[in-house]
Amino acid sequence: METVGHPINGERLDAGHRFQDVFNPATGQVTKRVALASKVTVEQAISAAQAAFPAWRNTSPIKRARVMFRFKELLEQNATKICQLIGEEHGKISHDAMGELQRGIENVEYACGAPEFLKGEHSKNVGPDIDCWSEFQPLRVVAGITPFNFPVMVPLWMFPMAIVCGNCFILKPSERDPSSTLLIAQLLQEAGLPNGVMNVVNGDKEAVDTLLSDSRIEAVSFS
């Protein structure tokens, strides 16, 4: 039986002592098993993201945006496969799954505009001999914990914007329907994202608690 592992630093880790069955809701059959990340595995993902951050932060917004343009193309090219996985593990019918994916793709499309919305502002002579400017800086390593009901759309609401703005990301999808989420993470890697910038850990309370308590995680998004 296929084991769903953890894409960390460009490699898939299946290590673990705890696993959970993944069911097809249409038949009730167990189709896969998903490895549940331990504290050590989550910490490994955080360390990979932390190591990747300096180079990614110093990558120009236009180069980050090029990854997002390619990622959008790959999502569209693999739409049928992504929606099939949503249906097999969540139970959505095909046009509902396609609608979910399209909403996510729209957010990737917006992220492609990073060179424009990351410009900041500059104002001259706001006071005597005083100029004022603003700029945007990434936080460092951030995380997203996403639900069962939208395994593709909600992650795509989170990580494209975080990554294109220069952050590195840890994603913890639902352990009940992980395969479509892992496929889009794989496509992001194929789009040219450097190793360690995007990492995925599957798990339960132990993984979530580690993300919430590790001081290296600067922000966490829930939905």
Image: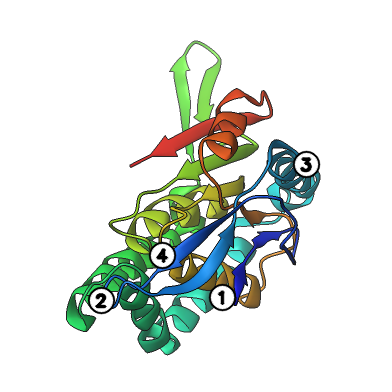
Q: Does label 4 or label 3 sit earlier along the sequence?
A: 3
C-beta proximity under 8 Å, tags 1 and 3: no
- Mark 3 lies on residue: 47
Q: Residue visible at 59% across and 39% down?
A: 207
- Given the image, on which type of amino acid does mark 1 rest? Leu
Q: Residue visible at 69% across and 29% down?
A: 216
Q: Nearer the viewer, mark 2 or mark 1?
A: 2
Residue 157, percent from left and from top? 37, 54
Residue 197, percent from left and from top? 68, 54
Q: Does label 1 or label 4 sit earlier along the sequence?
A: 4
Q: Residues within 10 Å of mark 1 (few under 14, many from 20)?
A: some
- Mark 2 lies on residue: 26
Tell me the SS state at disc 4: helix
Image vertical order of residue 70 relative to residue 178, above or below? below
Residue 114, percent from left and from top? 48, 56
Which mark is drawn over residue 6?
none
Between the C-alphas of marks 2 and 1, the distance is: 27 Å
Q: Residue visible at 71% across and 55% down?
A: 59
Q: Nearer the viewer, mark 2 or mark 3?
A: 2
- Given the image, on which type of amino acid does mark 4 rest? Val
- Given the image, on which type of amino acid does mark 2 rest? Ala
- Mark 4 lies on residue: 108
Between the C-alphas of marks 1 and 3, the distance is: 22 Å
Pick the front one: 80 or 102 = 80
Between the C-alphas of marks 1 and 4, the distance is: 13 Å
Tell me the SS state at disc 2: loop
- Mark 1 lies on residue: 187
Say which quarter of the image contains residue 43: top right
Check the picture and name the quadrant holding the N terminus.
Answer: bottom right
